[in-house]
Image (tube, helix red, strand yellow):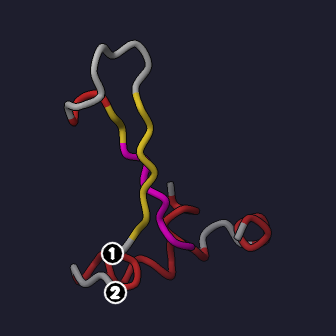
Amino acid sequence: MEKVNHVNPGIILDLLSPPVAFGNCPPTLKTANGVVLYKPGKDSYDSPASVRIMPLPKGILKVLE
């Protein structure tokens, strides 16, 4: 993806503009895996506030981030 962006920087946004404009996102772009990271210095990791979930989106969404 980096090479594609280097050759034609606007192509990724051009590909994703129609779904955004029409409010329709393909189901394959809506799924992601996540990694749970514990925040340092917390007394207890039982609370959701003591962890951070880092999403690992597939393909094109990762490039857009």
Determine the secondary structure under disc 2: loop
- For the record, the magenta segment spans 53-59
The Cα atoms of the two marked residues, 2 and 1, are separated by: 7 Å
Q: Looking at the picture, which amino acid does disc 1 mark?
A: Lys
Which residue is found at the position 46% from the left and 51% from the top? 35
Which residue is found at the position 58% from the left and 62% from the top? 63
**Horizontal side of residue 56 vs 24, given as left or right:** right
Residue 4 point in image, percent of width and height: 74, 73
Q: In which quarter of the view is residue 8 placed?
A: bottom right
Q: Nearer the viewer, residue 13 or 2?
A: 2
Q: Looking at the picture, which amino acid does disc 2 mark?
A: Pro
The residue beneath circle 2 is: 26
* CB contact under 8 Å: marks 2 and 1: yes
Q: Nearer the viewer, residue 19 or 39?
A: 39
Name above or below for residue 63 compared with residue 28.
Answer: above
**Horizontal side of residue 34 vs 3, given as left or right:** left
Determine the secondary structure under disc 1: loop
Magenta-colored stretch includes residue 25: no
Q: Main secondary structure of the magenta part?
A: strand
Q: In which quarter of the view is residue 32 placed?
A: bottom left
Which residue is found at the position 25% from the left and 84% from the top? 24
Residue 52 point in image, percent of width and height: 36, 37
Name above or below for residue 47 compared with residue 59.
Answer: above
The residue beneath circle 1 is: 30
Which residue is found at the position 70% from the left and 71% from the top? 1
